[in-house]
Image: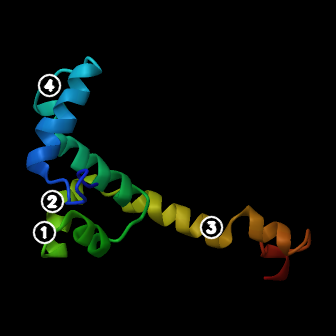
Amino acid sequence: MTLPDGTALSRSKFNPGVWKPTIRAAGIPDDRRNGMHVLRHTYASVLLDAGESTKALSAYLGHADPGFTLRAYTHRLPSSEDRTRRAIDKAFGEGQAADDGPEAGDGLETA
């Protein structure tokens, strides 16, 4: 985001000049729960939930060290159990069985 003169919109100008007036106009309380930092955390959480790498997220957020990003957002990572199930379902899911024909079934016929 840039200012009309093309320079980058800094946090020090965005927060008081855009964010706070917008949430007030929307009738949202102007407090810490609705501060601009929540927007940053929401952005990070959405990307992590979508599977973005910690290294890429670190660069997007301007962190010098992906380890810092990981420490800061570990609690927001989707559970590994769900991610594991989705990966296995994708690899061995119903779509693949349908492609192998009706005789493939669950594989027990050929065992």
- Image quarter in which the N terminus is found: bottom left
Mark yes or no: residue 79 visible: no
Against 25, residue 55 (above or below) is: below
- Please, what is the three-letter code of the amino acid marked with disc 3? Lys
- The residue under label 1 is 68
- The residue under label 2 is 72
- Please, what is the three-letter code of the amino acid marked with disc 1? Phe
Q: Nearer the viewer, residue 77 or 43?
A: 43
Decide which of tag 2 and tag 4 comes sooner along the chain: 4
Give the CA separation, mark 2 to mark 3: 30 Å
Q: Choose mark 2 or mark 4, whichever is in front.
A: 4
Q: Choose mark 4 or mark 3, whichever is in front.
A: 4
Give the SS element for disc 1.
Answer: helix
Against 63, residue 37 (above or below) is: above
Residue at point 20% right, 59% down?
A: 8
The answer to whether mark 1 and mark 2 are in CB contact below 8 A is yes
User: How many residues crowd around disc 2 within 10 Å: few (fewer than 14), some, or many (20 or more)?
Assistant: few
Decide which of tag 1 and tag 3 comes sooner along the chain: 1
- The residue under label 3 is 90
Give the CA separation, mark 1 to mark 3: 31 Å
- Please, what is the three-letter code of the amino acid marked with disc 2? Ala
User: How many residues crowd around disc 3 within 10 Å: few (fewer than 14), some, or many (20 or more)?
Assistant: few
Q: Nearer the viewer, residue 52 or 10?
A: 10
Q: Quadrant location of residue 53? A: bottom left
Decide which of tag 4 and tag 3 comes sooner along the chain: 4
Please state if 29 lies on the left or on the right of 88 as rendered: left
Against 82, residue 103 (above or below) is: below
Against 10, residue 30 (above or below) is: above
- The residue under label 4 is 30
Q: Residue furthest right?
A: 102
Give the SS element for disc 2.
Answer: helix
Tell me residue 47's x, y (percent): 37, 58
